[in-house]
Amino acid sequence: MGFLYPIFVSSFFVLNYAALNSQLQSSQTDRATTEGGKFSSEYPEFENSIQRALSWLITQRENDWGWRNDTAKVLTALRLAAVHDDFNPILPSQLETELSAKQLEIEIVILLWRHREIPITPPKLAQYALAVTALCKDPREFHGHDLIGTLQHHEPVHDLEFAYASLAACSAKSHVRKKQIRRLLDIANTAKDHNIDTVAMTILALRCIVKDHRHRNLQHSLRRPSISLARQQHTDGGFGNVYNTAITMQALQEVPESNSYWNKTAARAYIETRQDPDGAFTDPGLTADSLLALLGKGLGAIRTLDCGKSDSDFDNHVEIDIAKSLSSHGNDSEIRNVTVTYTLWVGSNITENCTVSITAPRNTSFYNIMQMAMELDPHFTFEASEWPNGHYVHTLAGYKEEPMGYHYWLLYRLPEVPDPSAPPANQLVAPVGVDELLIDEGDHYLFWYKKL
Ligand SMILES: *[C@@H]1O[C@H](CO)[C@@H](O)[C@H](O)[C@H]1NC(C)=O
Ligand SMILES: *[C@@H]1O[C@H](CO)[C@@H](O)[C@H](O)[C@H]1NC(C)=O
Ligand SMILES: *[C@@H]1O[C@H](CO)[C@@H](O)[C@H](O)[C@H]1NC(C)=O
Ligand SMILES: *[C@@H]1O[C@H](CO)[C@@H](O)[C@H](O)[C@H]1NC(C)=O
Ligand SMILES: *[C@@H]1O[C@H](CO)[C@@H](O)[C@H](O)[C@H]1NC(C)=O
Ligand SMILES: *[C@@H]1O[C@H](CO)[C@@H](O)[C@H](O)[C@H]1NC(C)=O
Ligand SMILES: *[C@@H]1O[C@H](CO)[C@@H](O)[C@H](O)[C@H]1NC(C)=O
């Protein structure tokens, strides 16, 4: 019995890997053509420490799409770096990220499967839970397993592990018990008795907890411990070693009241001067930690990452209300409807060809247009799988992608209705997925099933 589950899991992933890998090859070809302008020359000398660290991390990726025992840390750092548009040209593509995310899942499955031989340590599990959350999945529902529940089940004895586990639970928007908050406050208020990394991690956890409206009132009790942490900066700009400096910088991010007690520029310089010429900070794990410090978006930002869905969090309600009131006061012409066409072609020689015209508000996602088209005309029926970063359309008009035969559905955004006698070039393949593609007046979309 015991071995059935892992075997099922591994064959499931292997199949998906084959499909994703071949999609990846084709998408890389498209990327190369599409972004030819940006990438045609060799990579430029990255002038900035963040870009160099990111590029180095990408070179360290293994053939299995992971980073040995640092997959979780590295994926978390890449996800937080993706918040800044500036780094998009260096960051992995959506498909590459999906492959690495699958590797992360495999590692977690193995961890759970082998827990009798090799006990799961709270920091390891916390690291994985944070990465799963950062990738916009719920660690409380990891293939039917509650990672946060497992993490919270045994309260770690060590304060650092306890703070890390609390941060992971809070970042997943899981309930943090009063008793747990009291212990964190105790650590924060007796900073002198603890290592600086423990105090920094505790402040990260508490900063996350006060983002929950039920614990807003605790905000003021973080002021003193934050300032006392800030004052531990050494004359060299650091807070001990690179790790301690990186974690402390993350704890003090977005804490304006501590700003006059430490020198951020000096801390940054402390880290930057310890970067190797190739962009590394010793190993992928420490490089990921340093990146989070340099980015100004650290572990404390995971709870509020935009995953494109609303939830019951107080902050999000406020944002939605603001968005609503802005649009109701806005100019009506801004929310006018636009008309686009949507065409399906089947076969490299185009043996099937049909087009529908759809009117919808500007900025509607192409995914929604596909759903409208499907209602209007059953010919446009489609099936898609869901990924952390959106829908992946694999079947349209009854044709399913066949990675083994290199048959794929390619999506184009065109300036004119496509003409079978002059098929579009690869440069016109849509640069983003169906959820991110927002319609505008004069857009013409084409999904073409062809052999690559
Ligand atoms: C991670 O792997 C590296 C090298 O592969 C090793 O030096 C390090 O001790 C490992 N860390 C842990 C926590 O297992
Ligand atoms: C902060 O550190 C930088 C670099 O070490 C230094 O140039 C600057 O004067 C410092 N700022 C303050 C306010 O001390
Ligand atoms: C709305 O915008 C259009 C075009 O930009 C303009 O002509 C019109 O006067 C605006 N209406 C209002 C109420 O601002
Ligand atoms: C549509 O999207 C563009 C770019 O994201 C934005 O500038 C514009 O304000 C959006 N318009 C509406 C009506 O949401
Ligand atoms: C597609 O057209 C080419 C030449 O126009 C022809 O050689 C080929 O056999 C056709 N393929 C199919 C599947 O009809
Ligand atoms: C494709 O459809 C358009 C309009 O629906 C039509 O004008 C054109 O002749 C069709 N082309 C082929 C090759 O069927
Ligand atoms: C926009 O289109 C929707 C249907 O998609 C329609 O209900 C709505 O009245 C239209 N709005 C305008 C301003 O034309």
Image (cartoon, rainbow, N blue to C red):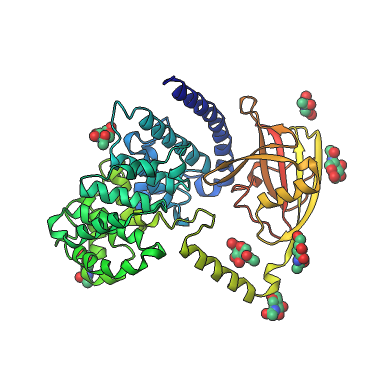
Query: x, y (%) of residue 295?
Result: 36, 56
Residue 50 lies, with reference to residue 103, above or below; the image says below
In the image, 112 versus 417, the foreground residue is 112
Foreground of the two, 396 or 166: 166
Residue at image coords 53%, 57%? 310
**Is 189 placed above or below 327 here?**
above
Q: Is residue 211 visible?
A: yes
Whole-percent x, y for residue 419 in the image: 79, 44
425 horizontally vs 96: left or right: right
Residue beneath the point at 34% across and 65% down: 254
Q: State the residue at coordinates (23%, 49%).
A: 160
Tell me where residue 249 appears, x and y as whole percent. 27, 58
Depicted 129 relative to depicted 50: above or below = above
Image spot of residue 97 (x, y percent)? 48, 41
Q: Quadrant of the N terminus?
A: top left
- Is residue 58 or residue 320 the one in the foreground? 320
Whether residue 42 is visible, yes or no, is no
